[in-house]
Amino acid sequence: MDIGQSINQNQGIIWHLEVDTNVKGTKEEATETRVLRQPWRAYWPPRCDKTMEIWLHSEFPQVVSWRFDHHQPFDRPWRSWTRSARALQERAAGLSFRSARESTVAKSLPPRTIAAPNSGGSSDVDDVIKYANIHGVDSSIFHFLTPLNIYNTEKPYLSRLPSGTKLPRTNIVTESQILEVFDVSGHESEFTLEKSGFQYAKSPIPMEVWNDSTVCSYYIPKVEEWLVQHLQCSGAFIYAYNNPGDTKNKSTKTPFLRAHCDATAASCFKRLQLYFPDRAHSLMKGRVRFLNIWRPISTPIQDCPLAMCDYRTVDPRDLVPADIIFPHYQDEAYEVLYNPDQRWFYKKGMEWDDVLLFKLGDNATDEAPLCPHSAFMDPSVPKDTPSRVSIEVRSIIFG
């Protein structure tokens, strides 16, 4: 696959959201077309000898020659270079960049005119909280995309490229909000993939050692088998996972403390073409879902659990598309704006066989298509609680 061809196939970003208002069965379509500047395009892919020279002299020059092979989906060199010392320095520089921008740019976006998909969704969920007597934990700090004017002309992005240029790692600026999070323990059945975009389940896959070898050779095949059985689907394909570290609780991935969705609809079905280039169009004729399966390894108390925003309380105007730039691929995710109508949930004290499933995308039009989520520091756990260790896998579900 040619890097330049794969990255450049989407020069302009067109936003098109088809919104199900869920009011008396009516359906409204709202289209907002906006071409946004994408700063990373000045650096990648290299289009001249000068930029090529920069990449060849970076600490990971293989970025220029590396090619994606859909037969080896777990070959991801950016896992090492995004943890490099220079990347850490660049993140620090990015923080300074963001602080300066935050102080000079007004925190406002133009009026958003896209209709909410679920009129009364927050009140419906509030009714569930009330009759099921679901209790909240002490208020916690969550981080959201700051609604800056800059995002009217410049698309948010996160680079997974090596260091070596003046391109900041990200242009994303966050703001903090104090929210109440509700514990679903004992009421898990109230929240389903179909309605809420997430659900909890039992997946008894015993693991004594967690590392790349055991995850790829044992855990992933077992999860695929379990998904087919649990969801009664025709097939499941896991295409990505995070490295959980080792059995000594030394995680290589820290909890992500920002509200987000890992994919947009365009991203999901573009990824289907990436992994199934010869079958993508035929597969799209059937049901296709994209799911994340998250499991805590440090149990039963997690200092930094994963909280889910019930899709019924999400206004599509809360979701802002953002680029994620890989060497071979321009991915797209959603950053999330704060909205007081959102309702956030988690399950406290997840055990070794507890898993959380949540949607990244779905081609069904009558179900929740996704679920915003974020890690958060649980104020109700003891102060000496060990740091959370977890594993997540991303899957494509067929049928």
Image (cartoon, helix red, strand yellow):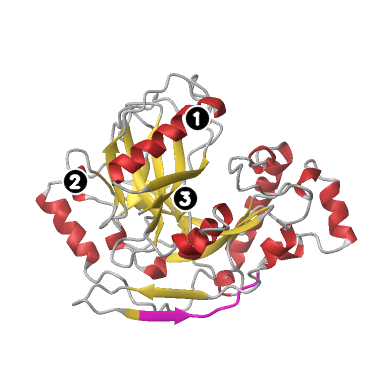
Task: Identify the residue at image location x=45%, y=39%.
Answer: 392
Range of magenta residues = 29-37
The answer to whether mark 2 and mark 1 are in CB contact below 8 A is no
Callout 2 amino acid: Ser
Q: In this view, does 338 lie to the left or right of 214?
A: left
Q: Mark 3 or mark 2, which has the lower sequence index? A: 2
Task: Identify the residue at image location x=67%, y=41%.
Answer: 77
- Which quadrant holds the C terminus? bottom left
Q: Mark 3 points at which residue?
A: 258
Give how far across and how far down residue 130 sits, in percent: 13, 53
In which quadrant of the rendered view does residue 100 lie? bottom right
Q: Is residue 134 left or right of residue 103?
A: left
Q: Name the residue under label 1.
A: 215
Give how far across and how far down residue 45 sits, in percent: 75, 60
Vertical placement of 255 versus 10: above or below? Answer: above
Q: Name the residue under label 2.
A: 189
